[in-house]
Amino acid sequence: MKLELEETPNGKVGGFIISPTFAGKSQIERQNMVWDYLDGHLDREHILYVVSLVTVTPDEANED
């Protein structure tokens, strides 16, 4: 897995999560995987700072 994240000056976080585990999964399934993980590992206060996470496979990331 590779993370490409940025933090804004006001502490908001967003970016890309690139992982082969997303292969064959819909965007909804991918997002559910990520948010289920975050819900289990971060407290509510920190989750509120996550604004956008794009989930792609390595092949999708290299399609540019």
Image (cartoon, helix red, strand yellow):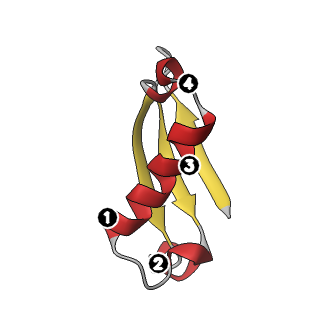
Residue 36 at x, y = what percent? 48, 49
For the residue pair 45 and 10, the one nearer the viewer reads as 45
Q: Which residue is mark 4?
A: 43
- Where is residue 43 shown, x and y percent of the image? 55, 24
* Element on which disc 4 rests: loop
> Of helix, strand and loop, which one carries label 1?
helix
Q: Amino acid at mark 1?
A: Ile
Q: Position of residue 50 (x, y in %)?
A: 45, 33
Q: Are marks 1 and 3 in contact (CB under 8 Å)?
A: no
The secondary element bearing badge 2 is classed as helix
CA distance for labels 2 and 3:
22 Å
Labels 1 and 4: the sequence-earlier one: 1
Q: Residue at x 48, y 59 (%)?
A: 33
- Quadrant of residue 38 within the rendered picture: top right
Q: Is residue 43 above or below residue 39?
A: above
- Residue hosting label 2: 60
Judged by depth in the image, the label closer to the viewer, 2 or 1, is 1
Q: Are marks 2 and 4 in contact (CB under 8 Å)?
A: no
Reply above or below: 15 against 22: above
Q: Residue at x 34, y 75 (%)?
A: 26
Nearer the observer: mark 2 or 3; the answer is: 3
State the residue lying farthest toward the right.
Answer: 1
